[in-house]
């Protein structure tokens, strides 16, 4: 049972800015009396007795009207007046909650310390109990601004209750009914309750294939893959969140399919969609958003009673906002109620009508509304779709506009989503409308509610509501194709000029271009028109070029590649050999490497871009393109050509004579020297690159395509290990991984992780290798990095062989190697072949091991990754070779391996080769030779005594030094 209320009436009760004195029947707000009727005050006193408890409508009727029989409409009217007096819902304040179909509860915090939300039996309370809490991140800032909703509390409570368990829920209603506002308010309340909420607005997307990217962008997920849906599902499969998808109707098929995939793959994700029609997806629940309530017959109702209906309340509020002096009589209120009824209770038409009434009066507006919509009402009675009601409302508003405002509204339909006010002026203005007239027309349309402010991105941004834009676009098409094309040309020219200024060909351009991310829908529209049948290549080609920084900053690699291909295919003499072609070719080569592998087309594009940069004497462009070519040839395993490009970059950097240029060139040269086996030359270059390079920045990485500080750090860690400094190598690789993780660039992060895996395998630190490989796998699959994903199976196989499980691993490595080579990715070829040789040996497949190692050695000697040559020769010495007789060629191969390791300055390989050779000599009785071989290596290391290789060397040293001492003692005895 519930506790009975205290018999003692409190002297004062405070909540929010209010103070209630029951005895004096007085309510004040910050010391000022609040005008509130007696019945409304009685309701407040009843509800506040037990905060959090839901009072049924019958209870409240008996408390407030104890001796009178009244209908529920009276309760509803008084409750509306009470909420209005309290400002319920304004600025996030909530005092009264509706339990749908049951009653009402007071949910504010009162002065006795009770918090209503703790005892709230409503759906919000259920959500609070089960909501995932966010430690340091909330998506509330990603939601559009909330507006005060009128008459939608029951809908909000219902939606919150339905979302208490993860599900797919669609808010369906006519255009202008308030679906988006309801979804946004729901999102803010969920976020306040501790839920992670993301918001995806599809209104600026016309291409269904871009829907997964829109969802990923809303969730803050970087996508660099042909299949963004796979990356999206991988990211959210274990997360608890609510994804709000707004404006689905024009992409309903694509949204339905993707929503089903999300629900299947991510069982703890809820989807709240808005659409003019159901998604018709599996397990979808639909909430039909009905019209705002308005009286069926207003003739007998008072002004106070009429004001309690949500549709009328909305009209009065919007009219007062449009004219501070607006007042209404009971007769005018009845006309307003009739207009709301005839407008079908839809929020947007009501708001437009209210704005008109604020300027021209209620009676004139009522008369005009009747004239404009009489035929439509007849059609609606024979099942004319509700959209025609909105169409008629917009027709009426449009017909009232002066010619210049009509043309302005039509031309603004070219914009997708939010647009800056300066763009509106420039796109509207032509020979018939100057910029001042355009600016005035925009201001007037804002005042009339046909253009709405959009403050989510910038204080000077506006947008057309989706239905207004569709209406204006249709009117524009009627105006004539010439005006449509001229407007589209000005629209595209605006974005060309803006992005040209924001994104010059420099790394700083990426930071400036990223600020245009809210204009992505307009950029896509401008590009599509420019390359369309009635477009303008004079705009389209350079627009595609200046769009590159924005697209790359958003990790839209596939889209960037596609626009570059379209632009390059349409090049003519006006653009060939220009800076625009250079940027297009450079971006095409880079994006092809990431999305399709090291295909021939990528090389052709990069070589063409380099030739243009040389013809233009653009030294910074040359450095950037030489760097990409160096990496391209490195990836296909042509290390000699890669070194050639690096050497050219060194010469260009000397001409530039700037520290950052020298750092990039030194990185390229150092990496090339390391891979070719010249560790003594690689180390100073890499250390110079690290010393001169700036701290890693994402914009720098995007500009060059790779992070050269990161590449230098990985190569330096490998070089240090090869030179016999494992402790320094471990410290360097850990620092590099940390910097790469902070950069928020998946390609760079995976490069660091891949380098670390190879290093840990060399060091035979297998637990660390396994943990790093798991992270490499997670990041690669999450971001859809094709070559990395192809390498995963092989890397796991290499680790399995090191752990003594060769049988299953061999097939995995061979499969992975074949996949990589099909994409011309040879960076891991030698690494995988070394693992295969080891696996073959452990499996007793000596002949296969011998064939493979000889093939690998031949490739390394002919320009391959020479750093591995000493180890390959050492591995070959362990393979029985029947053709060489019982003794084989082991000693010859080990001596060659030892000489190669010393020539490279690769002490780590030298230790392994010397250990194997010493064992061979010991077995042949050549203890003194073994002693002379091992002694300098045993005495010289300054670090790494705890490594497996040095422990093995120490074991040999103890054996040969003991034998050497005995031999020395015997010789002394003989001499004596």
Image (cartoon, rainbow, N blue to C red):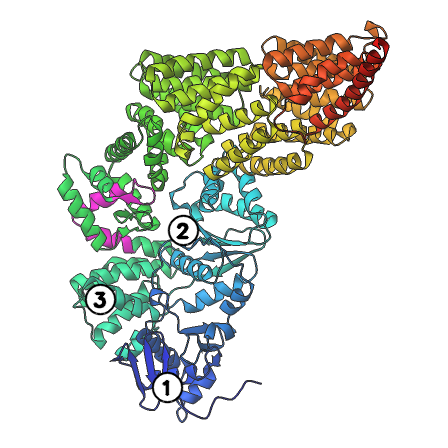
Mark 3 lies on residue: 320
Of pointers 2 and 3, the one earlier in the residue sequence: 2
Q: Position of residue 316 (x, y in %)?
A: 26, 68
Q: Earlier in the sequence, mark 1 or mark 2?
A: 1
> Pointer 1: what residue?
42
| Residue 718 position in % (x across, y down) | 58, 25
**Left or right, residue 402 beside residue 682:** left
In the image, is 340 to the left or to the right of 696? left
Q: Quadrant of residue 972?
A: top right
Disc with the residue nearer the chain's start (3 vs 1): 1
Q: Would you identify the image quadrant in which residue 843 lies?
A: top right
Image point 26% across, 58% down: which residue?
352
Label 3 close to label 1 by CB (< 8 Å): no
Q: Secondary structure at mark 3?
A: helix
- Of badges 3 and 1, the one in the foreground is 1
Mark toward the viewer: 1 or 2? 2
Q: Is residue 643 visible?
A: yes
Q: Residue 584, image x and y in percent?
A: 38, 22
Q: Is 416 inside the magenta-drawn segment?
A: yes
Instruction: Specify the label residue 142 is tagged with.
Output: 2
771 is higher (above) or lower (below) than 669: below
Taking depth in this image into account, of 856 and 140 the one nearest to the observer is: 856
Where does the N terminus fall, quadrant-wise?
bottom right
Q: Is residue 717 left or right of residue 470?
A: right
The residue positioned farthest toward the front in the image shown:
976
């Amino acid at each position: 049972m519930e506790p009975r209320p205290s018999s003692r009436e409190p002297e004062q009760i405070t909540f929010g800015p209010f103070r209630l004195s029951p005895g004096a029947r007085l309510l004040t707000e910050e010391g000022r009396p609040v005008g509130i009727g007696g019945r409304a005050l009685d309701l407040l006193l009843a509800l506040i007795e037990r905060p959090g408890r839901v009072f049924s409508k019958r209870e409240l009727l008996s408390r407030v009207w104890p001796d009178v029989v009244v209908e529920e409409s009276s309760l509803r009217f008084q409750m509306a007046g009470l909420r209005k007096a309290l400002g319920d819902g304004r600025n996030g304040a909530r005092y009264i909650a509706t339990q749908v179909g049951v009653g009402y509860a007071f949910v504010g915090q009162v002065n006795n310390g009770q918090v209503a939300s703790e005892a709230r039996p409503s759906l919000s309370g259920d959500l609070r109990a089960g909501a995932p809490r966010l430690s340091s991140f909330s998506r509330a800032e990603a939601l559009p601004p909330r507006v005060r909703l009128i008459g939608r509390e029951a809908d909000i409570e219902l939606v919150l209750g339905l979302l208490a368990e993860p599900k797919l829920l669609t808010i369906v209603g006519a255009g202008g009914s308030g679906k988006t506002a309801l979804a946004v308010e729901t999102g803010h309340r969920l976020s306040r309750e501790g839920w992670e909420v993301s918001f995806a607005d599809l209104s600026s997307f016309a291409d269904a294939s871009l829907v997964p990217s829109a969802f990923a962008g809303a969730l803050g997920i970087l996508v660099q893959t042909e299949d963004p849906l796979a990356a999206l599902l991988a990211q959210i499969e274990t997360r608890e969140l609510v994804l709000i998808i707004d404006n689905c109707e024009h992409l309903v098929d694509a949204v339905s399919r993707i929503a089903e995939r999300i629900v299947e793959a991510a069982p703890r994700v809820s989807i709240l969609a808005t659409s003019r029609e159901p998604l018709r997806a599996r397990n979808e629940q639909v909430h039909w958003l009905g019209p705002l309530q308005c009286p069926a017959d207003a003739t007998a109702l008072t002004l106070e009673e009429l004001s309690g209906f949500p549709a009328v309340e909305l009209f009065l509020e919007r009219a007062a906002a449009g004219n501070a002096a607006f007042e209404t009589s009971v007769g005018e209120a009845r006309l307003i109620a009739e207009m709301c009824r005839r407008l079908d209770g839809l929020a947007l038409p009501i708001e437009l009508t209210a704005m008109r009434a604020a300027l021209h009066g209620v009676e004139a507006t009522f008369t005009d509304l009747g004239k404009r919509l009489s035929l439509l009402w007849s059609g609606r009675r024979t099942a004319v779709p509700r959209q025609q009601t909105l169409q008629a409302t917009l027709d009426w508003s449009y017909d009232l506009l002066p010619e210049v405002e009509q043309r302005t509204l039509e031309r603004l339909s070219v914009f997708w989503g939010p647009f800056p006010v300066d763009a509106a002026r420039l796109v509207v203005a032509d020979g018939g409308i100057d910029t001042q007239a355009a600016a005035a027309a925009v201001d007037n349309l804002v005042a009339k509610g046909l253009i709405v402010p959009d403050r989510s991105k910038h204080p000077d941004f506006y947008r057309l509501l989706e239905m207004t834009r569709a209406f204006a676009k249709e009117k524009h098409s009627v105006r004539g194709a010439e005006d449509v094309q001229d407007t589209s040309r000005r629209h595209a020219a605006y974005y060309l000029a803006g992005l040209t200024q924001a994104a010059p060909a420099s790394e700083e351009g990426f930071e400036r271009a990223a600020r245009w991310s809210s204009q992505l829908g307009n950029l896509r529209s401008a590009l599509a028109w420019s390359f369309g049948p009635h477009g303008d290549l004079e705009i389209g080609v350079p627009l595609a070029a200046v769009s590159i920084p924005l697209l790359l900053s958003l990790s839209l690699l596939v889209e960037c590649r596609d626009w570059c291909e379209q632009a390059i295919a349409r090049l003519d003499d006006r653009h060939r050999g220009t800076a625009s072609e250079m940027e297009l070719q450079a971006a095409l080569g880079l994006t092809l490497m990431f999305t399709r592998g090291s295909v021939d087309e990528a090389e052709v594009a990069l070589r063409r871009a380099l030739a243009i940069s040389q013809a233009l004497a653009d030294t910074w462009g040359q450095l950037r393109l030489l760097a990409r070519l160096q990496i391209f040839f490195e990836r296909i395993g042509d290390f000699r050509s890669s070194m050639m490009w690096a050497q050219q970059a060194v010469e260009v950097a000397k001409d530039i004579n700037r520290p950052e240029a020298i750092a990039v060139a030194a990185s390229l040269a150092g990496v090339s020297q390391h891979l070719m086996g010249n560790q003594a030359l690689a180390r100073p270059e890499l250390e110079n690159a690290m010393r001169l390079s700036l701290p890693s920045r994402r914009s720098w990485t995007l500009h060059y395509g790779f992070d050269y500080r990161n590449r230098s750090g990985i190569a330096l860690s490998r070089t240090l290990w090869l030179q016999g400094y494992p402790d320094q190598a471990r410290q360097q690789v850990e620092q590099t991984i940390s910097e790469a993780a902070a950069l928020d660039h998946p390609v760079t992060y995976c490069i660091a992780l891949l380098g670390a895996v190879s290093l840990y395998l060399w060091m035979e630190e297998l637990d660390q290798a396994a943990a790093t490989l798991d992270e490499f796998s997670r990041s690669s699959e999450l971001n859809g990095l094709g070559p990395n994903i192809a390498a995963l199976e092989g890397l796991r196989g290499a680790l399995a062989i090191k752990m003594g499980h060769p049988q299953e691993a061999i097939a995995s490595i061979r499969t992975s190697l074949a996949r990589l080579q099909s994409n011309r990715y040879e960076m891991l070829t030698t690494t995988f072949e070394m693992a295969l040789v080891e696996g073959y040996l452990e499996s007793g497949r000596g002949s296969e091991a011998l064939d493979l190692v000889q093939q690998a050695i031949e490739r390394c000697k002919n320009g391959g990754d020479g750093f591995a040559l000493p180890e390959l020769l050492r591995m070959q010495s362990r393979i029985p070779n029947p053709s060489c007789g019982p003794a084989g060629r082991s000693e010859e191969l080990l001596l060659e391996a030892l000489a190669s390791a010393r020539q490279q300055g690769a002490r780590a390989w030298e230790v392994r080769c010397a250990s194997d050779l010493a064992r061979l000599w010991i077995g042949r009785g050549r203890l003194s030779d073994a002693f002379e071989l091992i002694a300098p290596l045993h005495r010289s290391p300054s670090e790494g005594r705890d490594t497996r290789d040095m422990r093995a060397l120490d074991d040999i040293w103890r054996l040969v030094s003991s034998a050497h001492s005995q031999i020395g003692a015997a010789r002394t005895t003989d001499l004596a």
